[in-house]
Image (cartoon, rainbow, N blue to C red):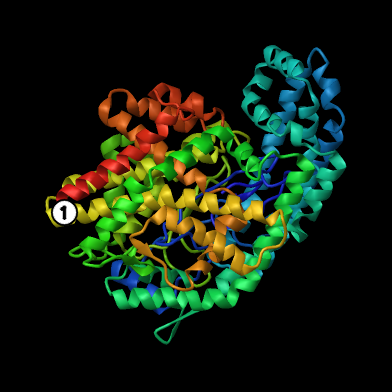
Amino acid sequence: MTGAFSFGAFSAPGLFGRGQTGHIRWSVSLIRQLSLVTFPVFSSSASSTVSSSASETDRHLPEWDLSIFYAGPDDPQIAKDIEVLRADVGDFSTRYRGQIGPLARDDAGGEALAEALRALEGLEDRMGRLASYAGLLFATSSMVAAHAKFYGDIQAVLTELGSDLIFFSLELNALSDQEIEALSGASEGFRHYRPWIEDQRLHKTHDLSDELERFGQDKSLSGRSAWVRLFDEHMGRLRFDLDGESRSLEEVLDKLSDPDRGLRERAVRSLVSRFKQEQPLFAHITNTLSKDLQTERKWRGYEDVATARHIANRVEAPVVDALARSVMAAHPKLSHRYYALKAKWLGLPHLEVWDRNAPLPKEDASLISWDRAREIVLGAYGDFTPELASIAAPFFERGWINAAPREGKAGGAFSHPTVPSANPFILINYMGRARDVMTLAHELGHGVHQVLAAGQGALMADTPLTLAETASVFGEMLTFKRLLAETKDKAQRKAMLAQKVEDMLNTSVRQIAFYTFERRLHEAREKGELSATEIGEIWMSVQGDSLGPAVKFCEGYETFWCYIPHFIHSPFYVYAYAFGDCLVNSLYAVYEQSPDGFQDRYFEMLKAGGSKRHKELLAPFGLDASDPAFWAKGLGVIDAMIDELETLS
């Protein structure tokens, strides 16, 4: 997820920066919520069913140790840090506001601006510690009133401080390209920050005046951010009636992979019943945020509804268009073919919505203990290189993972990088399923990436989303390949391959379908407010195309758009998943074909963080995402797996 400050299920677009993309970019985390239908957020997962599942695997799942930040939300050090930050931000503003141009034209201006950038980086790290602590606390206990208040208060403080820093990138962007080149040539310190400066200059033609930027910043908490928070908190309170019991969203979604077909159907109907009741609110939130996006596009002069996201991701629109076209062209040989196969395996004429993620016959449904999950993932990482496992091990040893389902805890999973002076923190809801092990492998990949990229410093550690999924999906692939190699039983091998294909379809085909839905929704919203029915029609228009004729949709499935947090938190975020999945498929093929020296190149790519663009990072592997054949190669990996499944069938 991207935004000026966002991570996992916590998002506050607009904080510390301008617009949807965040002009002064603060640490951005990466979500991976491997739910069976989509990506729930803030769903409570600690009622009886989930707790009992967890207790069967482990009674002592790890939780975070956040003491690296503060002793608690009432720690007096928090108030002291805020007071000092206010003074330091004020001093920074007084010293540099209106001075960037004159400094750039001074003989020693390069070193003076390098000093300013180092000071800004220090401020970001300190502000990021506050933001990270408040957000992580809220993610584990959103229903605790004191924590929700603390979260809101910290948002307000950081919005105020961020408003006083907006001038800096605006004034940098006012410099000419020739002046930037001259400063880089004259000062090694300035040259070090050139990647971050170039990221800011992507916004140059879309900048507003300092007064308007500050006004937008100050209004963010009562504008877009308020609607996002309303969505999050309302989603956290939702309960669903399933078999006479009140269940959380995540619990009901979990039932969609249950062997009992009747239970799966009842779970879907429970979701439909509740979503129909909630549609007016979710439609209003969606319309409001879409109008906000439209207003921003008008004022900033964005060419397309997704331009802001492409800028934030540092990727060219034609590259994303090529990805989307390649995925949609591959529907018949990927998703359409696979779901037709699955219907045959299940002995059904077609799949209903509740069958799409059903386990296969003879699939091993036994629960996996936390210790075993750790052994599997670290073993797979160690097979690639012992260094990878050694970087991952501290997550288990130092309280960097929160795995226990709890009331009020965020649903799904994420890895939040926090700031370079601290460490990443991983959140998952571990229930002992094989999919949970893969989620752990995925989030741990993010965590390792974030540890390695931290060396770039607070301004450049943040990896663009188009590359941020690289280490996570690669970690999944390492884990999957190891488990597959250990599996000799033909039926189990088939089930494992099928599960991997389903995950890859959810990550590529489904996410591009979501991206297509968003495009159509925001384009339609420009003509006027949309009813819940109209939004549902747009949703259904892409579902059949993406899933194919083997999947039938029950009445009410048109409501399933309403709870996907990515649409609310970060418009057009979802294509980053497909980008990352196809990229890793191609990257892993390079590894299998030419393993010598691959590990060193791989680590160098992760260490680069946000200091390089996708072309620079992929070049050492002979890959180019701007080449249409690149996407065909990545999708070909899924195609080959389905070929093998047909053979096994």
Task: Specify whether residue 397 is in view.
Answer: no
Instruction: Write the residue at 52% across / 33% down.
Output: 319
Q: Nearer the viewer, residue 430 or 343?
A: 343
Q: Nearer the viewer, residue 527 or 6?
A: 527
Residue 74 position, x and y percent, is 66, 64
Image check: 511 left or right of 359? right
Image check: 204 left or right of 402? right
Q: Nearer the viewer, residue 335 or 537?
A: 537
Position of 177 relative to 637 (above/below): above
Instruction: Write the residue at 75% across / 59% down.
Output: 223
Disc 1: which residue? 649
Q: Quadrant of the rendered structure where residue 361 is?
A: bottom left
Image check: 62 left or right of 382? right
Residue 267 position, x and y percent, is 40, 75
Residue 627 position, x and y percent, is 45, 27
Image check: 360 left or right of 586? left
